[in-house]
């Protein structure tokens, strides 16, 4: 894992992203009292009807879910 810039994120074809709390040693701090120390993100697209399409498996979720 590494830090990325907004410019790098914009050009990733299929990003697999996480927001993590990182300690001074550069490793993820998994055992912490803080909430949301590790958040897994998934990038989606919308189709012409406004439904959400999950990029990694092509599943379509109705816009009414959001």
Image: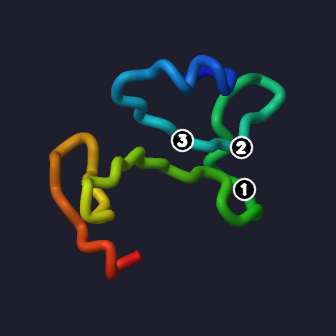
**Circle 3 sits in a helix, a strand or a loop, which is it?**
strand
Identify the residue at the far front of this view. Answer: 48
**Circle 2 sits in a helix, a strand or a loop, which is it?**
loop
In percent of width and height, residue 33 lies at 75, 63
Quadrant where the C terminus is found in the figure: bottom left
Residue 47, can we see it? Answer: yes
Up/down of 13 relative to 34, above or below? above
Q: Toward which corner of the image does residue 48 lie, by quadrant?
A: bottom left
Mark 2, residue position: 21
For disc 1, the neighbor class at 10 Å (few under 14, some 14 to 19, many from 20) is few
Q: Is residue 6 left or right of residue 12?
A: right
**Circle 1 sits in a helix, a strand or a loop, which is it?**
loop
In percent of width and height, residue 52 lies at 31, 60
Mark 3, residue position: 18
Which sits earlier in the primary sequence, circle 3 or circle 1?
3
Which residue sits at x=32%, y=64%?
Answer: 50
Which residue sits at x=70%, y=65%?
Answer: 35
Up/down of 7 relative to 59, above or below? above
Work out how far the residue at label 3 is from the one at label 2, CA to CA, in angstroms.
Answer: 10 Å
Are the two marked residues, 2 and 1, in contact with CB atoms closer than 8 angstroms? yes
Mark 1, residue position: 32
Which residue sits at x=48%, y=48%?
Answer: 41
Q: Which is nearer the eye, 52 or 1?
A: 52
Q: Which is nearer the eye, 30 or 6?
A: 6
Work out how far the residue at label 2 is from the one at label 1, CA to CA, in angstroms.
Answer: 9 Å
Are the two marked residues, 3 and 1, in contact with CB atoms closer than 8 angstroms? no
Q: Which is nearer the eye, 24 or 62?
A: 62
């Amino acid at each position: 894992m590494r830090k990325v810039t907004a410019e790098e994120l914009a050009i990733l074809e299929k990003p697999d992203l996480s927001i993590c709390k990182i300690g001074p040693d550069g490793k993820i701090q998994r055992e912490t009292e803080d909430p949301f120390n590790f958040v897994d993100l998934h990038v989606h697209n919308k189709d012409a009807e406004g439904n959400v399409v999950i990029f990694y498996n092509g599943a379509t979720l109705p816009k009414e879910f959001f």
